Amino acid sequence: MFYTTRKLNIVLLQRMDYSKGKNAPSWLWLQQELFHHSKLSNEKYAVFCGRDALLGKLSVTMWESSSTQHPPLVVYGPPGCGKTALLCKMAQEMRAVLEPQAVVMLRLLGTSPLSTDVDFVLKGLCVQVCGAFGLATPSPQTANTHDKLLRFFHVLLQKVSDQGETLLLILDSLDHLSNANNAHKLHWLPKEIPPNIHLVVSTLDEGCPLEGLTAFINDDKYFFQVEPLTLDQGQSITDAYMYVAGRKLTSEQMDTILHSFQKSGSPLHLKLMLDMAKQWSSYTTMSDIQLGNSVPEVISTFLQALEVKHGKKLVRHALGYITLSRFGLSEAELRDILSLDNDVLAEVYQNRLPPNHSLIRFPPLLWARLRHDLGDHLVERWENDTSVVKERYLSVELRVQMHTVLSEYFTGQWSHRQLKPILLPSLMTQLNADRKVPSQPLWFTEGTANLRKLHELPYHLLHAGKWEELRHSLLGSLDWLYCKTLSCGVDSVIQDLSLCADVMDCLEIQLIRECFLLLKPTVDFIDGNIDSSLLFTEIIARLQGLAHAYPALIGRLCSQCQDWFASCSDPVLIPKSSFIQAPGGPLKTTLSGFTKGVSAVDICCEKNMLIAGSEDGELIVWDLKHLEVLHTLEGHTGAVQWVKPVDKGDHCLSAGCDGCVRKWSMCSGKQLYCIQAAVSVQFRTTPLLHVLDSRAVLLSSTDSQVKAWNVDTGDFLYEVSVHADNLVLGIMGQEVAIVSSDGQLWLHDAITGLQKSHNHLTSAQELTITSVLTFTKHGRLLIASQESSVILVCIPCCERTLAVLHLEPNSVHRTQDFQHEAIVLSAASYSHGSKVITGSLDQIIRVWGLTTGQLLDSISGMASPVTSLLVYNTTIISASSSSTYLKLWKLDYDSKHKSQSCVPANCPRVVISKDGNTVHFIREEDKRKVFTWSCTEGMSSDSMEVSSDVCCMELAQQKRLLFCGLRTGTILIYPLAFTQETLCLPPPESLPEVRSMAISPREDRMAVSYVDAVCLFEITARDSFPCVEGPFESYSLSLLHSPVSAMALLTDCRLLYGTLGGEVAVYDFKNATAAELDHHGAAITCVTLSNWDTHALIGSEDCVQKLWNLSPLLLDHTMEYKGFYFEGVMCAAFSVNDKYVFTGSRDKTIKVWDVATGSLLYIQYVYAAVIKITPFKDGFIAISQLGSYIKEGFRCPDALTPGYNPLRNFRAHYRVTSREKTLDPPHTFLKGDYNPAQFNFMSMFKTKQAKSTNTCVLL
């Protein structure tokens, strides 16, 4: 008894009742797919005859492989041989072979729009399997990301198998999949099917799918060829087919059909002839009928008969429009399009006049007759064989003409009573007539897009040669891009842009395409339900820097974004600078998939493969040409330390901290063998293993042993014990070199392991070996250590210097030193060794000229220390042991497209001037130098040396004083108006570290937090020269007091501070009183005062931030925000008018809060945590951890629209707890920009006397 798709639909709907929720995904498309495939399968099965022997073989093979892992079963044959009908029959009858509870799922690929897309096929199968077996469905992020969806599908099959359930998946016509995600290469298809799971696929007998299947399935018993039908089988099918149709053939007619069929044996050939035979009468003589001997001949004969009966132009154009359409045409659309075709109308009205001269339409009766005669030939199939129609009818000129008519229809050019001229032969005069075709708006109603226009119009404009209209009306239209992204998905937009970029030589289209490729992961993460503000922010923040250079399209898009932001009725942040990775720059793509850092990387240029291993023991193999996952290899239980492709990329070796060496097949992704206890379980930076390819030997070193195995089989060869520690391996010719930490060198035969020589390289001092290089050409070994480099040369080691060596047969010369600002972690060469690429701790990739030593390029954006570097053609591959992704960078990018960072990544201290034109910062790797970046000039303008590490920095905006607190307790003060001068506040006697500093709003006082006390200083002036005096007051901190982490000094000398322990307190220097406030659950990260000195925001590393009223001191709002990733506030700033507060969070977002209500108004994802933010005009200026300069305005209406939800694009929730306010305090409003330093301005120049004070010293 065959399970019906309808029955499973009911089960799915019951299990997925949550989909009725407002934000839940809709599975309507899956229901439609299931009904479609079920209906089509029943139609194919209805007239199926024969193939019993082949079905029996398939059943036996499935039964034999049920209890073991096995490859897919492959059914193959030429077009029209009956593969689809065979699999439909198989789906019906497999219930008798499998157990009663087994589930059978059938997909007839290419018979619907969604069944041509491999991602939708996999998504539908995953949801259907989960619904059938009660498993969790894939999350939106997984379902919309190809690599994650693929992994989910493979894991899902294993889960079903582990539960002991039986599942049969049947995928017909793999060759009908679209080229999206390189589906024809079948990297997505499981190579090993777990027990109780069966996968049957079909494909043509030639082409890419079958080549891919034969590459990873080595056993012929899993391949089943569909042979041509015999004459008896053909007769049985004919009898059954005509019986269902209610017709009967004469003996003459039967003999003629079978005679023609016998020449091909093709079921499709037979079906086409039977479709023609259904129109015959009993007295039809075969002398009047011409039957072809092949499928193309039958189709040509059939088309010729249609031309005679209905007119040549009508048949040609009707079938031509269907063939040239991108995703087919409905009957209503085809009648409208034929009404716009003057050639067809001229043929129709050749001998008669139209009924109405002002309104001319194609007669519907003519189409009804043609549709009837087409019968089953006009099927609802999206990947049909249209080669005969194209060859017979569609010349190049006619294609352009017909694409033009199609584009005019989908643009609605002749709707709304627009009159189209036509010259009819019967009148010999031109008529301007209404064609009565519907309009084609972009949106039918709010939320209902014109999907047909979105899918068809760009395709037809491109092929009609209307490129300017395509560029300006579609690709350069923000409304079009948003509507298509929202309604069809970002993949559909990328496909359109790719199609246009391939045909049109337009750099702007390529940049827009790359822009959508870069924003795709963000859209996929939110399940494609993109909000207009999110899309427009992504576009303008990426393209704004290119708008001036490319005004035609990119400039128009940016201008439209600005117009939309200006008219937006909801709160919104408006980008004023380009701060997200721009298209056309060095970043090519990001490869993700790991859950922990990447610990080992290698490439195979012969197979264009990238192999990477992570600290969680997982390996992923990518195809570098198409940037898709080939295999996910799981086996190691510890971090992967080493990977190596062997046998020209057919296999791969890997070693992990679990002590195992594993060999993998790169064709099937299957583990071939595992060598236990082969390597040390301790992670080491020096090479653990070496492969001697010429002799197929794998060598491994532990603390005092060297072992060897046969690479091909994994068989153990020999073991060498050495009386020394910390051994390092190398290869010298055909010999194994063993180097110990005490400077001994042994040479052994690689095959037998016999010792050949033993030498001492150094004195008795210990060596800390950092790398070993094998020079095959010279048979030499170069060993680099932290103490020296051996083999004929001694080179001092410097962690920030990359030494370049020139190797000769008997000597090594040091030729070049590349000085770095941080520790060099990785290096690679390219361009025949003329250039070197280095990766360092400061997260920057640098490109050097080898001969000149010149720094050619510097690439930032890795966002983690670069521990691995590889070069593939013109692509840099970078990885980090602290990041879960790899990044690919283009070496041949256009430098004018490169995004400029104003500061290096991960600067520990940053301050921004009030006008936003200057940024002062400290580098992580050099905390004894203060750098200055001019935002107007786009370059570093100055640097200042300091005597110790800078622990904190503050900037007095009005007085232009830069304060730097040092680890020694000293405070250096740089008057920015007097660049040659430096002031100094000596440290206290105990030389405590300066933990934090705070400047009062009027810039007349400064509080300094040391380890054991907080001191108060006054900022004054003498003879118009700035001066700092004090300390006038001090506040001792107890030994049990947590270190102060952030603080703010109020105008009335109250100090509001927070600690690393989460304590919050206020200390009044005037009254010497202290009071504790509400504690936080984590370290306090920021204490920010409002510009009016009325509020303060206290943020911490947890999800809570609190907004305090300072007069009186009361807690106004407690704002809790918990997101999908990291939580906690890093910095904050109040808007100039104090109505809003901007916060930069660890979850890489900027949030805007309403000060009056505490409500969250807006969230924006900026791809990096914001480390410093300062108010500016109607918005703010911020610096991110990646060094990006973020300048934005904020626009908020007086009243929010009903139902406004700031979390609509984010998986998070927030809660605000506010106190009841019985009386609103008076609020003074000053028109214009508020400047706190203007109040009591004259007091700045007064010198105060105080007890026991120190005055800053001029250096």
Image (cartoon, rainbow, N blue to C red):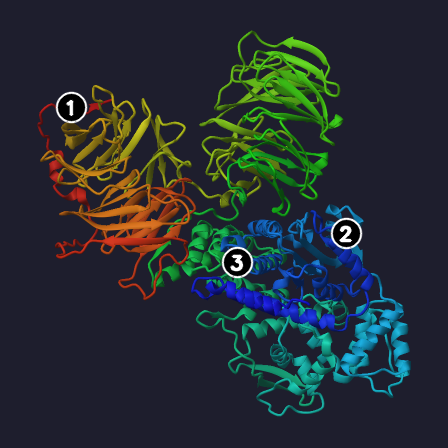
In what quadrant of the picture does the C terminus appear?
Answer: top left
Q: In which quarter of the image is residue 101?
A: bottom right
Q: From the viewer's perspective, is 492 left or right of 1157?
A: right
N-terminal of the pair, mark 1 or mark 3, is 3
Give the residue pinned by disc 2: 222
Q: In which quarter of the image is residue 337?
A: bottom right
| Mark 1 and mark 2 residues within 8 Å of each other at the beta carbon | no
Q: From the viewer's perspective, is 959 left or right of 115?
A: left
Q: Mark 1: which amino acid?
A: Asn
Q: Which residue lies furthest to the top in this view?
A: 763
Label 1 sits on a secondary structure element that is strand
Residue 822 locus on image (x, y percent): 45, 27
Q: In which quarter of the image is residue 684?
A: top right
Q: Is residue 1175 above or below residue 1195?
A: above
Foreground label between 1 and 3: 3
Q: Is residue 837 above or below residue 296?
A: above
Whether residue 778 is visible to the viewer of this picture, yes or no, is no
Residue 666 locus on image (x, y percent): 68, 41
Q: Mark 2: which amino acid?
A: Tyr
Label 2 sits on a secondary structure element that is helix
The residue at 69%/71% (across/down) is 42
Whether residue 748 is visible to the viewer of this picture, yes or no, is yes
Residue 1193 locus on image (x, y percent): 33, 53
N-terminal of the pair, mark 3 or mark 2, is 2
Foreground label between 3 and 2: 2
Q: In this view, does 426 lie above or below 382?
A: below
Q: Mark 3: which amino acid?
A: Val
Q: In this view, does 414 lie above or below 581?
A: below
- For marks 1 and 2, give the CA distance: 90 Å
Give the residue pinned by disc 3: 490
The mark found on residue 1254 in the picture is: 1
